[in-house]
Structures are given as C-alpha cells and as structure tokens.
Amino acid sequence: MNAVIRRFADAPALTRAALDLVAAAAREAIAQRGRFAMALSGGATPLPLYAAMAREGYGAPPEATLFFFGDERLVPVSDSRSTFGVVAPLLFTPSPVPVGNIHPMPVEIRPAELAAATYEAEVRQALGTAPGEVPRFDLILLGLGPDGHTASLFPGSPALAETAALVAAVPPPTTAAPAVPRLTFTLPLMNAARRVRFLTTAKGEEAALAQALADRPDPAVPASLVRPDGELAWLVDEGQGGVRRDQPK
Ligand code: 6PG
C-alpha cells in the first residue's frame, strides 16, 4: 500500500507529530487556495490533538479554516456520545473560530437520510464544488476501530458500496458501541481528499491494523478501503494507548 506508516512510543509523541502534519497541510492549503478545509474524526485518540491545536495553533488562521466532521452519532450535542459535544470544548472554545466555519453534522434532522443529504449539500456549498464533482478536503482525519471500521463505515455496511452519495446514514452498528444510528462520510468523499491521516493506537487493534495496512483492500476491514487520490499516512501509538470512547455505555 502506498502509505506512510509512522509509529510512536506514546500518545504525546503521536499528538506532536499529528499537530505538525495538520499544520503542514494547513500552510500548504492557505498558500495554494487561501483556505483550509479539514474533517475531524471521533474517538479518543485525536482528542489531545484537538486540545493542542487550540493551544498552539494549527498553521492556518481560524477565519480561513473550515471544520467538518467525518462521522457523528445521531444524538443531541449535550449527549456524552456526541463527537461534536466532546470536540467543541477542546478545539473551539479555547481558541474561538467563526461560527460559520464550524460545520457539525445536523443530528436534529430526521429521517437520517435527509440529514445525510443536508450535510452533503453543506459540504458542497462550503467547499464550492461544481455539480458532478467530488469535493476535495485538504485534510481528513480518521480513526480505526477494533472491528476495522473507520468513521462510521462498519464491516458489512451497505454504505461501503456507495459510489455517488458523499454522506450516508448508517443504522446502529452491531460491532461497536454505542448502538445509535450515525452519519458518515463515504469512500468517494474520503478518497477524493488531498490528505488522509489515520490516528490510532495499536493496543487492542493489532489485527485490524495489520489488515488495514495490507496491500489488498478488504471490505471486511473498511479502513483498508481508504486509498485516497492524495497522500495517505498512518500514525500509530505503539504504547499502552488511551481510554476508548467507543465503549458500551
Ligand atoms: C468515533 C468514530 C470511530 C473512531 C474509531 C477509533 O468513535 O467517533 O466513529 O471511527 O474514530 O473507533 O476510536 P479511538 O480513537 O477511540 O480508538
């Protein structure tokens, strides 16, 4: 697989490298397009990165940065299972970002399919994508679940076969908690990105990691299907890892 794989002794080392990579992507995007469009991932691994971005900056002015989310659980923002609810106080409160630049997934819209279509339209409009073209994020952050899922693309999900829609509604997963419906970026949107960075911990995920990094993509391991047009890198914490957010509640 044509990916850069970097391994780190602990979470702080991974966070430091991830911040450098975000800043490099941001500086390039600002220099070339005057704007930095980034999609954030859920899970526990990137949370220290979000805090570091707010504390130290991330290579682009907040006014020129657009923040999206690669997936979300369909729960209110006040619910502890909401990715936006967890990320916002870390990233947006300490270092204010213009509210129009922050794009949480529309969890209040039902049915979920309409929420997915609404978010796709929001991505298209914000990134100024022509009809028929696929928007290109400057950077998409992703994680890896023990079952091989990434964002909310789970093994066996019909969303894996999506070739047109950029955002999909997915039913409650059977292989990961919490069992609530979700929205997720699809593979066409992920694979159009200029840069994709997976942030993951090896502990407890060795098998999924080995499969995700294998040369041959395998639908049983959705993360292995992310093979973007742009640069792909995996940042792996080889230490004891942190606390998973994706635990049964
Ligand atoms: C979420 C994401 C999920 C996550 C991975 C990795 O939980 O919000 O849907 O894809 O990124 O499960 O999570 P950890 O970083 O906690 O290992």
Image (spheres, grey):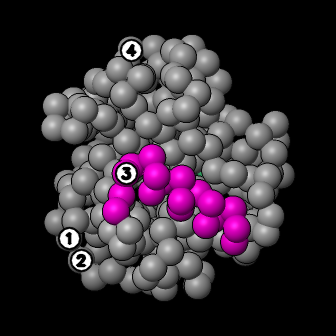
Residue at image mark 1: 1
CA distance for labels 3 and 4: 29 Å
Q: Nearer the viewer, mark 3 or mark 4?
A: 3
What amino acid is found at the position of numbered circle 1 in the picture?
A: Met
- Placement of the N terminus among the 4 image quadrants: bottom left
Residue 59 visible at all: yes
What is the secondary structure assignment of the residue under circle 3? loop
The crowding category of the residue bearing disc 1, from other C-alpha atoms within 10 Å (few below 14, some 14 to 19, many at least 20), is few
CA distance for labels 2 and 3: 34 Å
* Residue 13 at x, y percent in the picture: 34, 29
Residue at image mark 4: 56
Assess whether residue 54 is covered by the magenta stretch.
Answer: no
Residue at image mark 3: 128
Assess whether residue 124 is covered by the magenta stretch.
Answer: yes
Q: Are marks 2 and 1 in contact (CB under 8 Å)?
A: yes
Q: Nearer the viewer, residue 20 or 66?
A: 66
What amino acid is found at the position of numbered circle 3 in the picture?
A: Gly
Earlier in the chain: of badge 4 and badge 1, it is 1
Q: Nearer the viewer, mark 2 or mark 3?
A: 3
* Residue 136 at x, y percent in the picture: 32, 56
What is the secondary structure assignment of the residue under circle 4? helix
The crowding category of the residue bearing disc 4, from other C-alpha atoms within 10 Å (few below 14, some 14 to 19, many at least 20), is few
Q: Nearer the viewer, mark 4 or mark 1?
A: 4
Residue interval drawn in magenta: 113-130
Earlier in the chain: of badge 3 and badge 1, it is 1
Residue 215 has which mark?
2
